Amino acid sequence: MTRKRIIYGILTLLVVAIIGGVIYLNSLLPIITGYAAKNLCSAVFISGRDAKDVEAVDLNFSFIKYTSNEVDTIEKSVTSHFLWSSSKAIYREGFGTTLIRGISEEALRKITFPVNKNSVYSQDTINWPLGDVVTDSATGIDKVALGVISKELMRDSSSYHGNAFAFIVLHNGTPVVEAYKPKFNKKTKLLSWSMAKSFTNAMAGILVRQGKWKIDQPVGIEEWKSDDRSKITINDLLQMQSGLYWNEDYGNRSSVNVMLHCENDMSRYAFDQPLKYPVGTFWYYSSGTANIVSYLIRKQFGNDSLYYAFAQTELFNKTGMPDAIFEVDPTGLMVGSSYLYATARDYARFGLLYQNDGMFNGERILPEGWVKYTTSGASASKGEYGSLFWLNKAKTFPSVPENMYFCDGHDGQRIFILPTQKLVVVVLGYSPLSKGGMDCDRLLKDIINTL
């Protein structure tokens, strides 16, 4: 009898473990298929990349590589399947790609982008930085040595490691080297991942310059009024010190994965999180926080036409990136944490905006002092983080000056701004830490040595 009980007990535990495993796997399936559908759809219909190449590189990891993906070039959509689950993402002009969650495809397609995205000027005919006509001017940097670095970086077996698609360096505001892997060029729009957070910082700064925001005042979200979340300020959100619960682990069913791949309303998912730490006392990197800021930006406008026009006219058009695309969630929120598509030159222009203290092409875009605020360390971050920008005060890159600051994307997308050397360095591609990452410390050191 005792032996039978042991066997029954083991079988029961085994059944429970199997059921639990199936339940957990089932909870991961929307993330697996959602990730594949969303990213493949954007890569094909925004970046103009070949689907097979994207599957072989960007989607070739974990369970994602086992998805079966259907690309429909007529309706501009991607449907991804894995086991008993599937997800669909659709491309819409102006909005970019949106994963269908909590709304029908028919309803989503009826929503059209309310802003004229036609370029207000032809970049092919006007000079840098607003346009793409670059004169070959001397800036005091060794361009031959930079050319050697760029060729090495673009090699498949580069000693810098990683997989760079695009590379550009500005010195004294002028492009001095530019390189692309085959199938990519200066017109290719590439994914920002979390560099989008720094663009959200810029939009916040513009609202401050316009007198619409004071960052030290509580944000006033209705759902927070009855608890300690009412103390959270815009500054707390920008510096990732809100105290809200969050899990940024990309390897499981975490907060960030649920928000990006399962939720209809990303900002609501983020601001519905409970308070875990006293406001302003604990630093934790949170994509949810950036989407709360994006939600607050949206609230400033009476309708979405004004909301989208704000990003287009006040940031993109004025900084030489009129064709940039800030993708939206199903509710229409610009995904300020993760989903911006722009060219390597656009990202370099953005770095130049901050290097020039918020001025671009002779016009003030960000308020005076905003860059200084942005690059001042969040009190609990130990010098690692400012306001939606990463800092080098903690010497993350030991060969690089401490006053360097940067935008950092999940798969190794970076905009490095080196004020002392008057350098902006942009590296885009697929170089996730899970696959070893890129040796950016060595890359930056080599670039500095060309001065």
Image: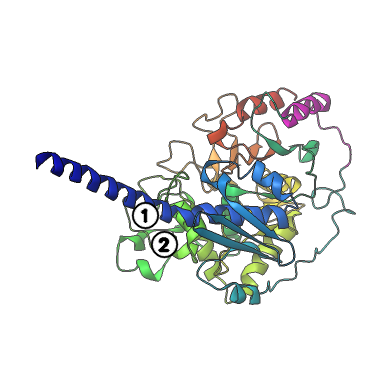
Q: Nearer the viewer, residue 335 or 318?
A: 335
- Is 148 part of what is drawn in magenta? yes
The quarter of the picture where residue 435 lies is top right
Residue 351 vertical placement versus 151 (above, below): below
Residue 104 vertical placement versus 200 (above, below): below
* Residue with the mark numbered 2: 271
Quick check: can you spot residue 202?
no
Q: Is residue 60 left or right of residue 380?
A: right
Q: Amino acid at mark 2?
A: Phe
> At 76% across and 49% down in the image, what residue appears?
188
Q: How many marks?
A: 2
Q: Nearer the viewer, residue 259 or 11?
A: 11
Q: Is residue 87 left or right of residue 325?
A: left
Where is the C terminus found, in terms of image quarters? top right
> At 64% across and 73% down in the image, what residue appears?
109
Number of residues whose C-alpha sits closer than 10 Å to that of mark 2, classed few (under 14), some (14–19) or many (20 or more): many
The quarter of the picture where residue 319 lies is bottom right
For residue 23, the mark is 1
> At 36% across and 49% down in the image, what residue appears?
21
Residue 402 vertical placement versus 3 (above, below): above
Quick check: can you spot residue 155?
yes
Q: Report the mark closest to the observer, 2 or 1.
A: 1
Q: Is residue 426 left or right of residue 180?
A: left
CA gap, disc 2 and disc 1: 27 Å
Magenta stretch in the rendered image: 135-155
Where is the N terminus found, in terms of image quarters? top left
Secondary structure beneath label 2: helix
